[in-house]
Image: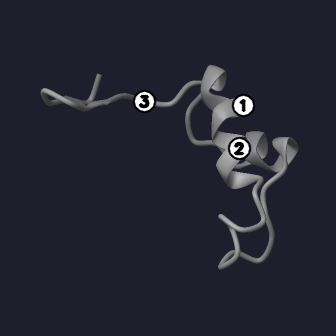
Amino acid sequence: MILETQRLLLREMTLSDLDALLLVLGDAESMRYYPKPFDRESSLRNREVQ
């Protein structure tokens, strides 16, 4: 855990978060200001959490 309030818990991301994260990072509309949406392989390649 990194930070906890009454309504929010921030924690380090893990590989089990990948599918949920890809719903946003892989969406063309969400990523419209990036060169292109991320796919699973590029998300794994660029991750900082082991």
Please name which of the two marks, 2 or 3, marks the residue nearer to the observer. 2
Choose between 29 and 18: the one closer to the eye.
29
The nearer-to-camera label among 1 and 3 is 1
Say if 23 sits above or below 5 in the image: below
Cα gap from disc 2 to disc 3, whole angstroms = 18 Å
Q: Is residue 3 above or below residue 35?
A: above
Q: Looking at the image, is mark 2 or mark 3 earlier in the sequence?
A: 3
- 3 vs 27, nearest the viewer: 27
**Residue underneath mark 3:** 12
Q: Judge whether 7 appears above or below 43 on screen.
A: above
* Residue 8: image location, x then y, percent: 25, 32
| Location of residue 5 in the rendering, given as x and y in whole percent from the top left corner | 14, 30
- Which secondary structure, mark 2? helix
Asked if labels 3 and 1 touch by Cβ distance under 8 angstroms, the answer is no
* Image quarter (top left, top right, bottom left or bottom right) of the N terminus: top left
Task: Please tell me which residue is depicted at 72% across the width and 43% down the height of the picture.
Answer: 22
Q: Which mark is residue 23?
A: 2
| Quarter placement of the C terminus | top right
Q: Which mark is residue 19?
A: 1
Q: Residue furthest left?
A: 6
Q: Name the amino acid type tagged 1.
A: Asp
Q: Distance of mark 1 from mark 3, alpha carbons? A: 15 Å
- Could you tell me the amino acid type at mark 3? Glu
Residue 13: % across, % down = 50, 30
- Secondary structure state at the residue bearing disc 3: loop
The residue sitting at 72% across, 68% down in the picture is 29
